[in-house]
Image: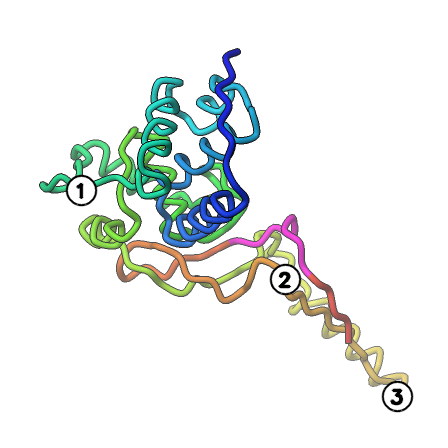
Amino acid sequence: MSTVSIRITTETRKALEATLSRAFKAGDLGMVKRVTALLGIARDAPVTLIATGVGVSPSTVYAWRRAFLLEGVVGLRVQWRGGRPRKLTKTQRERLGTIIEAGPEAAGFPTGCWHALLIQQVIQREFGVTYNVQYLATLLHSLGFSFQKARFVSDHLDEVARAAWLAYTFPAWRAQAEAAGGLLLFGDEASFAQWGSLGYTWARVGQQPVVRTTGKRKAYKVFG
């Protein structure tokens, strides 16, 4: 595997890391890839390994390195050349809608809510098209989606068992307690999800999204 070394100063490394942080926050997948590749080159990682890691060809990594050597961090920015962003075909748009409706977990992400960066990654992965994250809201609105507060429900609920408990089990317990002059005491458990329970996600307009909780995600348990 070929290795191409460059030496960067501490100041330049900090500038690259700051650029990478801003790119993550802005959802700029292209800049994330370019800066990640440059930092890999600075660590003497093989170009072929870097290219595989960011999903491009080795020649693209060499082009990024050349742009960086000529212009610094500024050379990593993609200049807008005018015209509309590349569009998805009708079939691809329908496919994207189906993916979003199925939820991010079905697409391989460890979360129950969609956000722009995840959808950007899905479009890149499925269709090879990179949209600016700031344009995605316009795209999703055109597909009939809106950003809504999700309703979280357990996927372990057994409605038949619950109905039976309310109709038979609880009345029997209450009768026993009354006959003995006793009290029924219940313990309560509250879960505070580390991934957040007041999440928003993209869903069809007019259809409140439902996120099913499985107990697999980490949460703090509080009993009372």
Q: CA distance from mark 2 to mark 1?
A: 59 Å
The segment highlighted magenta reads: 212-219
Of the numbered discs 2 and 1, the one sitting upstream in the chain is 1
Residue 171: say if magenta.
Answer: no
Mark 2 and mark 1 in contact? Answer it, CB < 8 Å: no
Q: Which residue is mark 1?
A: 80
Q: Which residue is mark 3?
A: 181
**Is tag 3's residue or tag 1's residue first in the polypeptide sequence?**
1
What kind of residue is marked 3?
Answer: Gly
Three-letter amino acid code at the position of disc 2:
Arg
Percent from the top left, x then y, of residue 89? Answer: 17, 32
Residue 217, relative to residue 150: is it above or below? above
| Mark seen at residue 162 | 2
Magenta region, mostly helix, strand or loop? loop
Residue extending furthest left? Answer: 83
Disc 1 packing (10 Å; few <14; some 14–19; many ≥20): few
Q: Residue furthest top?
A: 1
C-alpha span from label 3 to label 2: 26 Å
**Front label number (2 vs 1):** 1
